[in-house]
Image (cartoon, helix red, strand yellow):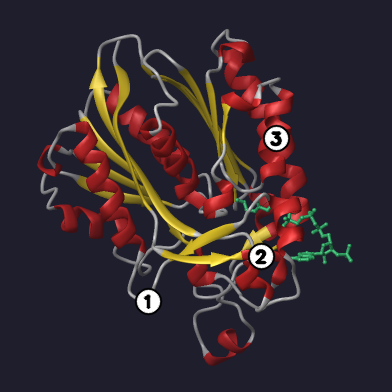
Amino acid sequence: MIRTRIIGTGSHIPAKVLTNKDLETLVDTTDEWIVTRTGIKERRIADNGETSSCLAHQAALNALDMAGISAAELDMIIVGTVTPDMPTPSVACLLQDKLKALKAAAFDISAGCTGFLYALSVADSLIRAGNHKKVLVVGVDTLTKITDYTDRTTCILFGDGAGAVVLSKDNGANGILSSLLYSDGSCGNLLYMPGGGSANPASPDTIAKRYHYLKMDGNKVFKLAVKALEDCVVKILSHNNLTSDAIDLLIAHQANLRIIQAIAKRLELPPEKVFINIEKYGNTSSASVPIALDEANRQNRIKPDDLILLNAFGAGFTWGSALVRW
Ligand code: UT7
Protein backbone atom coordinates (compact mmCIF):
# COMPACT_ATOMS: atom_id res chain seq x y z
CA MET A 1 0.00 0.00 0.00
CA ILE A 2 1.36 3.43 -0.94
CA ARG A 3 1.52 5.85 2.00
CA THR A 4 2.67 9.47 2.30
CA ARG A 5 5.24 9.95 5.08
CA ILE A 6 6.29 13.26 6.60
CA ILE A 7 10.08 13.00 6.50
CA GLY A 8 10.97 16.57 7.49
CA THR A 9 9.36 19.56 9.20
CA GLY A 10 10.50 23.18 9.34
CA SER A 11 9.26 26.60 10.30
CA HIS A 12 10.30 30.22 10.27
CA ILE A 13 8.98 33.13 12.33
CA PRO A 14 9.85 36.81 11.79
CA ALA A 15 12.04 38.41 14.47
CA LYS A 16 9.87 41.46 15.22
CA VAL A 17 7.58 40.98 18.25
CA LEU A 18 4.29 42.83 18.89
CA THR A 19 3.09 42.33 22.47
CA ASN A 20 -0.35 42.86 23.96
CA LYS A 21 1.12 45.87 25.81
CA ASP A 22 2.15 47.33 22.41
CA LEU A 23 -1.43 46.86 21.18
CA GLU A 24 -2.76 48.72 24.24
CA THR A 25 -1.09 51.82 22.77
CA LEU A 26 -2.77 51.33 19.36
CA VAL A 27 -6.40 50.40 20.18
CA ASP A 28 -8.79 50.35 23.14
CA THR A 29 -7.84 46.94 24.55
CA THR A 30 -5.97 45.35 27.45
CA ASP A 31 -3.47 42.56 27.89
CA GLU A 32 -5.94 40.95 30.30
CA TRP A 33 -8.81 40.96 27.73
CA ILE A 34 -6.63 39.52 24.98
CA VAL A 35 -5.13 36.76 27.15
CA THR A 36 -8.50 35.80 28.67
CA ARG A 37 -10.43 35.76 25.38
CA THR A 38 -7.76 34.33 23.07
CA GLY A 39 -4.71 32.98 24.95
CA ILE A 40 -2.42 35.24 22.89
CA LYS A 41 0.41 37.16 24.62
CA GLU A 42 2.45 38.27 21.63
CA ARG A 43 2.75 37.73 17.88
CA ARG A 44 5.48 38.17 15.23
CA ILE A 45 5.34 40.77 12.47
CA ALA A 46 7.02 40.49 9.08
CA ASP A 47 9.09 43.58 8.29
CA ASN A 48 8.82 45.65 5.12
CA GLY A 49 10.22 43.48 2.34
CA GLU A 50 9.83 40.31 4.43
CA THR A 51 7.30 38.60 2.16
CA SER A 52 5.41 35.33 2.34
CA SER A 53 7.88 33.72 -0.08
CA CYS A 54 10.81 34.85 2.14
CA LEU A 55 9.28 33.18 5.21
CA ALA A 56 8.30 30.11 3.16
CA HIS A 57 11.86 29.83 1.84
CA GLN A 58 13.42 29.65 5.32
CA ALA A 59 10.79 27.17 6.58
CA ALA A 60 11.34 25.00 3.47
CA LEU A 61 15.13 24.99 3.93
CA ASN A 62 14.66 23.82 7.54
CA ALA A 63 12.27 21.05 6.46
CA LEU A 64 14.55 19.90 3.62
CA ASP A 65 17.50 19.86 6.01
CA MET A 66 15.64 17.59 8.43
CA ALA A 67 14.45 15.37 5.57
CA GLY A 68 18.03 15.08 4.32
CA ILE A 69 17.10 15.68 0.68
CA SER A 70 17.97 18.47 -1.73
CA ALA A 71 15.45 20.80 -3.36
CA ALA A 72 16.45 19.30 -6.72
CA GLU A 73 14.71 16.06 -5.70
CA LEU A 74 11.30 17.73 -5.22
CA ASP A 75 8.75 16.98 -7.94
CA MET A 76 5.97 19.22 -6.55
CA ILE A 77 5.64 22.31 -4.33
CA ILE A 78 2.22 23.27 -2.94
CA VAL A 79 1.76 26.39 -0.80
CA GLY A 80 -1.33 27.22 1.25
CA THR A 81 -1.63 30.99 1.59
CA VAL A 82 -4.05 33.92 1.34
CA THR A 83 -1.29 36.53 1.44
CA PRO A 84 0.87 35.87 -1.63
CA ASP A 85 3.70 38.31 -2.39
CA MET A 86 1.48 39.51 -5.27
CA PRO A 87 -1.62 38.14 -7.06
CA THR A 88 0.61 36.40 -9.59
CA PRO A 89 3.01 34.59 -9.79
CA SER A 90 2.18 32.23 -6.97
CA VAL A 91 4.25 31.97 -3.79
CA ALA A 92 4.94 28.36 -4.81
CA CYS A 93 6.59 29.52 -8.07
CA LEU A 94 8.61 32.21 -6.27
CA LEU A 95 9.66 29.55 -3.77
CA GLN A 96 10.59 27.09 -6.51
CA ASP A 97 12.93 29.73 -7.92
CA LYS A 98 14.44 30.58 -4.51
CA LEU A 99 15.07 26.88 -3.80
CA LYS A 100 16.23 26.15 -7.39
CA ALA A 101 13.85 23.19 -7.28
CA LEU A 102 14.07 22.85 -11.04
CA LYS A 103 12.14 19.55 -11.34
CA ALA A 104 9.16 20.69 -9.27
CA ALA A 105 5.79 21.89 -10.55
CA ALA A 106 4.40 24.52 -8.19
CA PHE A 107 1.06 26.08 -7.27
CA ASP A 108 -0.77 27.84 -4.42
CA ILE A 109 -3.98 26.85 -2.67
CA SER A 110 -6.30 29.50 -1.22
CA ALA A 111 -8.38 27.99 1.57
CA GLY A 112 -8.08 30.56 4.38
CA CYS A 113 -6.45 29.27 7.54
CA THR A 114 -7.17 25.70 6.34
CA GLY A 115 -4.73 26.21 3.42
CA PHE A 116 -2.04 23.93 4.83
CA LEU A 117 -4.45 21.04 5.43
CA TYR A 118 -5.91 21.44 1.93
CA ALA A 119 -2.38 21.43 0.47
CA LEU A 120 -1.39 18.40 2.58
CA SER A 121 -4.44 16.47 1.43
CA VAL A 122 -3.86 17.28 -2.27
CA ALA A 123 -0.18 16.34 -1.96
CA ASP A 124 -1.11 13.05 -0.28
CA SER A 125 -3.51 12.26 -3.15
CA LEU A 126 -0.85 13.04 -5.77
CA ILE A 127 1.66 10.79 -4.04
CA ARG A 128 -0.78 7.92 -3.56
CA ALA A 129 -1.89 8.23 -7.21
CA GLY A 130 1.68 7.27 -8.03
CA ASN A 131 2.83 10.33 -9.99
CA HIS A 132 4.93 12.10 -7.35
CA LYS A 133 7.58 10.92 -4.91
CA LYS A 134 8.87 13.98 -3.02
CA VAL A 135 6.52 16.89 -2.36
CA LEU A 136 7.10 20.07 -0.36
CA VAL A 137 4.00 21.47 1.35
CA VAL A 138 4.14 24.92 2.94
CA GLY A 139 1.64 26.93 4.95
CA VAL A 140 2.57 30.60 5.03
CA ASP A 141 0.79 33.85 5.75
CA THR A 142 1.65 37.45 6.45
CA LEU A 143 -1.82 38.46 7.64
CA THR A 144 -0.42 41.50 9.46
CA LYS A 145 0.05 43.09 6.02
CA ILE A 146 -3.76 43.07 5.58
CA THR A 147 -4.66 43.75 9.23
CA ASP A 148 -6.31 47.01 10.24
CA TYR A 149 -4.47 48.31 13.32
CA THR A 150 -7.42 50.60 14.11
CA ASP A 151 -9.81 47.61 14.47
CA ARG A 152 -9.47 46.04 17.92
CA THR A 153 -11.67 43.07 17.00
CA THR A 154 -9.11 41.74 14.49
CA CYS A 155 -5.69 43.33 15.08
CA ILE A 156 -5.10 41.54 18.38
CA LEU A 157 -5.37 38.12 16.75
CA PHE A 158 -3.01 37.85 13.81
CA GLY A 159 0.71 37.17 13.40
CA ASP A 160 3.04 36.10 10.59
CA GLY A 161 5.01 32.91 9.95
CA ALA A 162 5.62 29.86 7.80
CA GLY A 163 5.71 26.11 8.33
CA ALA A 164 6.69 23.35 5.93
CA VAL A 165 6.75 19.58 5.58
CA VAL A 166 8.60 17.34 3.12
CA LEU A 167 6.47 14.39 2.05
CA SER A 168 7.80 11.16 0.64
CA LYS A 169 6.22 8.14 -1.03
CA ASP A 170 6.49 5.09 1.23
CA ASN A 171 5.23 1.52 1.35
CA GLY A 172 4.88 1.03 5.12
CA ALA A 173 1.82 1.28 7.38
CA ASN A 174 2.70 4.71 8.82
CA GLY A 175 2.06 8.13 7.29
CA ILE A 176 -1.04 10.16 6.47
CA LEU A 177 -3.92 7.80 7.28
CA SER A 178 -6.68 10.06 5.98
CA SER A 179 -7.85 13.62 5.63
CA LEU A 180 -11.26 15.27 5.53
CA LEU A 181 -11.91 18.66 3.91
CA TYR A 182 -15.05 20.81 4.01
CA SER A 183 -16.25 24.21 2.80
CA ASP A 184 -19.34 26.37 3.25
CA GLY A 185 -19.16 29.30 0.85
CA SER A 186 -22.39 30.78 2.22
CA CYS A 187 -20.36 31.94 5.25
CA GLY A 188 -17.76 33.79 3.18
CA ASN A 189 -18.98 37.15 4.52
CA LEU A 190 -17.89 36.28 8.08
CA LEU A 191 -14.19 36.73 7.30
CA TYR A 192 -13.09 38.47 4.12
CA MET A 193 -11.07 41.23 2.51
CA PRO A 194 -13.27 43.22 0.13
CA GLY A 195 -10.60 45.11 -1.83
CA GLY A 196 -7.89 44.34 -4.34
CA GLY A 197 -9.73 41.66 -6.36
CA SER A 198 -12.06 41.83 -9.35
CA ALA A 199 -14.99 42.93 -7.13
CA ASN A 200 -13.25 46.06 -5.89
CA PRO A 201 -9.99 46.62 -7.79
CA ALA A 202 -7.55 48.85 -5.94
CA SER A 203 -8.46 52.54 -6.26
CA PRO A 204 -8.20 55.64 -4.05
CA ASP A 205 -11.85 54.96 -3.11
CA THR A 206 -11.25 51.34 -1.96
CA ILE A 207 -8.24 52.50 0.02
CA ALA A 208 -10.24 55.31 1.65
CA LYS A 209 -12.88 52.71 2.61
CA ARG A 210 -10.17 50.48 4.15
CA TYR A 211 -11.18 47.63 1.83
CA HIS A 212 -7.61 46.25 1.85
CA TYR A 213 -7.96 44.99 5.38
CA LEU A 214 -9.58 41.87 6.81
CA LYS A 215 -13.15 42.20 8.12
CA MET A 216 -14.46 39.60 10.54
CA ASP A 217 -17.49 38.70 12.61
CA GLY A 218 -15.35 36.98 15.25
CA ASN A 219 -18.11 35.71 17.48
CA LYS A 220 -19.96 33.98 14.60
CA VAL A 221 -16.68 32.50 13.33
CA PHE A 222 -15.95 31.23 16.84
CA LYS A 223 -19.28 29.40 17.15
CA LEU A 224 -19.12 27.93 13.63
CA ALA A 225 -15.54 26.80 14.15
CA VAL A 226 -16.28 24.89 17.34
CA LYS A 227 -19.25 23.08 15.80
CA ALA A 228 -17.54 22.33 12.47
CA LEU A 229 -14.34 21.06 14.09
CA GLU A 230 -16.19 18.91 16.62
CA ASP A 231 -18.13 17.22 13.78
CA CYS A 232 -14.99 16.84 11.70
CA VAL A 233 -12.73 15.25 14.32
CA VAL A 234 -15.47 12.83 15.39
CA LYS A 235 -15.98 11.82 11.71
CA ILE A 236 -12.30 11.31 10.91
CA LEU A 237 -11.86 9.07 13.95
CA SER A 238 -14.92 6.98 13.12
CA HIS A 239 -13.88 6.69 9.41
CA ASN A 240 -10.65 5.14 10.67
CA ASN A 241 -12.34 2.94 13.30
CA LEU A 242 -10.50 4.80 16.04
CA THR A 243 -11.58 6.38 19.30
CA SER A 244 -10.14 9.55 20.79
CA ASP A 245 -8.07 7.67 23.37
CA ALA A 246 -5.86 6.52 20.45
CA ILE A 247 -4.73 10.12 19.83
CA ASP A 248 -1.24 10.89 21.11
CA LEU A 249 -1.18 14.58 20.16
CA LEU A 250 -3.71 17.11 18.90
CA ILE A 251 -2.12 19.78 16.73
CA ALA A 252 -4.93 22.26 16.15
CA HIS A 253 -5.10 25.54 14.27
CA GLN A 254 -3.92 28.11 16.82
CA ALA A 255 -6.71 30.67 16.39
CA ASN A 256 -8.13 30.90 19.88
CA LEU A 257 -7.15 28.93 23.00
CA ARG A 258 -10.81 28.54 23.93
CA ILE A 259 -11.59 26.87 20.58
CA ILE A 260 -8.70 24.41 21.02
CA GLN A 261 -9.83 23.67 24.58
CA ALA A 262 -13.42 23.06 23.40
CA ILE A 263 -12.21 20.45 20.88
CA ALA A 264 -9.88 18.86 23.44
CA LYS A 265 -12.79 18.63 25.88
CA ARG A 266 -15.06 17.06 23.24
CA LEU A 267 -12.34 14.43 22.63
CA GLU A 268 -11.62 14.08 26.37
CA LEU A 269 -7.92 14.74 25.76
CA PRO A 270 -5.71 15.60 28.76
CA PRO A 271 -3.60 18.81 28.45
CA GLU A 272 -0.39 16.88 27.71
CA LYS A 273 -1.98 15.56 24.50
CA VAL A 274 -2.77 19.05 23.20
CA PHE A 275 -0.02 21.15 21.63
CA ILE A 276 -0.35 24.89 22.27
CA ASN A 277 1.89 27.73 21.08
CA ILE A 278 -0.74 30.42 20.42
CA GLU A 279 0.64 32.57 23.27
CA LYS A 280 3.82 33.26 21.25
CA TYR A 281 2.53 33.70 17.70
CA GLY A 282 -1.22 34.44 17.69
CA ASN A 283 -3.16 33.21 14.66
CA THR A 284 -0.70 32.73 11.78
CA SER A 285 -3.43 31.43 9.44
CA SER A 286 -2.15 28.71 7.04
CA ALA A 287 1.15 28.60 8.91
CA SER A 288 -0.25 27.77 12.34
CA VAL A 289 -0.61 23.98 11.98
CA PRO A 290 2.79 23.34 10.30
CA ILE A 291 4.60 25.68 12.75
CA ALA A 292 3.02 23.81 15.68
CA LEU A 293 3.83 20.46 14.05
CA ASP A 294 7.46 21.49 13.58
CA GLU A 295 7.80 22.78 17.15
CA ALA A 296 6.21 19.62 18.57
CA ASN A 297 8.54 17.50 16.42
CA ARG A 298 11.67 19.42 17.44
CA GLN A 299 10.64 19.31 21.11
CA ASN A 300 10.40 15.48 20.84
CA ARG A 301 6.69 15.62 21.64
CA ILE A 302 6.14 13.19 18.73
CA LYS A 303 7.48 9.62 18.84
CA PRO A 304 7.52 6.94 16.13
CA ASP A 305 4.06 5.31 15.71
CA ASP A 306 2.30 8.19 17.52
CA LEU A 307 -1.14 9.11 16.20
CA ILE A 308 -1.35 12.85 15.45
CA LEU A 309 -4.63 14.65 14.80
CA LEU A 310 -4.37 17.89 12.82
CA ASN A 311 -7.27 20.30 12.35
CA ALA A 312 -7.95 23.79 11.05
CA PHE A 313 -10.74 26.17 10.06
CA GLY A 314 -10.80 29.53 8.36
CA ALA A 315 -12.15 31.96 5.83
CA GLY A 316 -14.26 30.54 3.08
CA PHE A 317 -15.66 29.07 5.36
CA THR A 318 -13.28 26.08 5.19
CA TRP A 319 -12.31 23.42 7.67
CA GLY A 320 -10.75 20.00 7.84
CA SER A 321 -8.60 17.51 9.66
CA ALA A 322 -5.97 14.87 9.03
CA LEU A 323 -4.76 11.81 10.91
CA VAL A 324 -1.07 10.95 10.74
CA ARG A 325 0.62 7.82 12.09
CA TRP A 326 4.18 9.13 12.69
O1 UT7 B 1 -8.65 31.42 11.67
C1 UT7 B 1 -9.94 31.92 11.72
C2 UT7 B 1 -9.83 33.34 12.13
N1 UT7 B 1 -10.79 33.83 13.06
C3 UT7 B 1 -10.92 33.41 14.31
O2 UT7 B 1 -10.37 32.44 14.76
C4 UT7 B 1 -11.83 34.22 15.19
C5 UT7 B 1 -12.62 33.39 16.15
N2 UT7 B 1 -13.24 34.28 17.11
C6 UT7 B 1 -12.60 34.66 18.24
O3 UT7 B 1 -11.46 34.28 18.47
C7 UT7 B 1 -13.37 35.52 19.20
O4 UT7 B 1 -14.70 35.68 18.74
C8 UT7 B 1 -12.73 36.93 19.42
C9 UT7 B 1 -11.46 36.78 20.25
C10 UT7 B 1 -12.43 37.59 18.09
C11 UT7 B 1 -13.70 37.80 20.23
O5 UT7 B 1 -14.04 37.15 21.45
P1 UT7 B 1 -15.57 37.01 21.86
O6 UT7 B 1 -15.58 36.37 23.18
O7 UT7 B 1 -16.31 36.35 20.75
O8 UT7 B 1 -16.00 38.53 22.03
P2 UT7 B 1 -17.16 39.35 21.29
O9 UT7 B 1 -16.84 39.58 19.85
O10 UT7 B 1 -18.48 38.75 21.62
O11 UT7 B 1 -17.05 40.75 22.03
C12 UT7 B 1 -17.28 40.88 23.45
C13 UT7 B 1 -16.99 42.30 23.86
C14 UT7 B 1 -17.65 43.34 22.95
O12 UT7 B 1 -18.04 44.43 23.76
P3 UT7 B 1 -19.58 44.60 24.23
O13 UT7 B 1 -20.39 44.68 22.96
O14 UT7 B 1 -19.88 43.35 25.02
O15 UT7 B 1 -19.55 45.86 25.03
C15 UT7 B 1 -16.52 43.79 22.06
O16 UT7 B 1 -16.71 45.11 21.56
O17 UT7 B 1 -15.58 42.56 23.77
C16 UT7 B 1 -15.35 43.75 23.00
N3 UT7 B 1 -14.07 43.62 22.32
C17 UT7 B 1 -12.90 43.97 22.90
N4 UT7 B 1 -12.62 44.50 24.10
C18 UT7 B 1 -11.31 44.73 24.39
C19 UT7 B 1 -13.81 43.14 21.08
N5 UT7 B 1 -12.50 43.18 20.84
C20 UT7 B 1 -11.92 43.69 21.96
C21 UT7 B 1 -10.58 43.97 22.31
N6 UT7 B 1 -10.34 44.48 23.53
N7 UT7 B 1 -9.54 43.71 21.46
Please say if 247 is above or below 45. Answer: above
Is the CB–ligand 1 distance for label 2 below 8 Å?
yes
**Disc 3: which residue:** 261
Relative to 20, 125 lies left or right? left
Q: Earlier in the sequence, mark 2 or mark 1?
A: 1
For label 2, the crowd category at 10 Å Cα-Cα, with few meaning under 14, some 14 to 19 and many 20 or more, is some
| Quadrant in the picture for the C terminus | top left
Please say if 179 is above or below 153. Answer: above
- Residue 152: name its quadrant: bottom right
Which one is in front, 322 or 318?
Answer: 322
Q: Position of residue 37 (x, y in %)?
A: 75, 52
Inspect the image, locate mark 2, and give the three-letter code of the amino acid beneath it.
Answer: Thr
Q: Residue at x 58, y 21 (%)?
A: 236
Residue 90 in sight in this render: no
Q: Rounded to the nearest whole Å, what is the CA distance between mark 2 and mark 1?
A: 21 Å
**Disc 2: which residue:** 154
**Disc 1: which residue:** 48
Q: Residue at x 57, y 7 (%)?
A: 241
Residue 265 in sight in this render: yes
Relative to 183, 259 lies left or right? right
Q: Position of residue 69 (x, y in %)?
A: 14, 35
State ligand 1's quadrant. bottom right
Q: Position of residue 300 (x, y in %)?
A: 39, 27
Q: Rounded to the nearest whole Å, what is the CA distance between mark 3 and mark 1?
A: 35 Å
Secondary structure of the residue carrying numbered label 3: helix
Secondary structure of the residue carrying numbered label 1: loop
Inspect the image, locate mark 3, and give the three-letter code of the amino acid beneath it.
Answer: Gln
Front of the two marks 2 and 3:
3
Q: Earlier in the sequence, mark 3 or mark 1?
A: 1
Inspect the image, locate mark 1, and give the three-letter code of the amino acid beneath it.
Answer: Asn
Please say if 107 is above or below 198. Answer: above
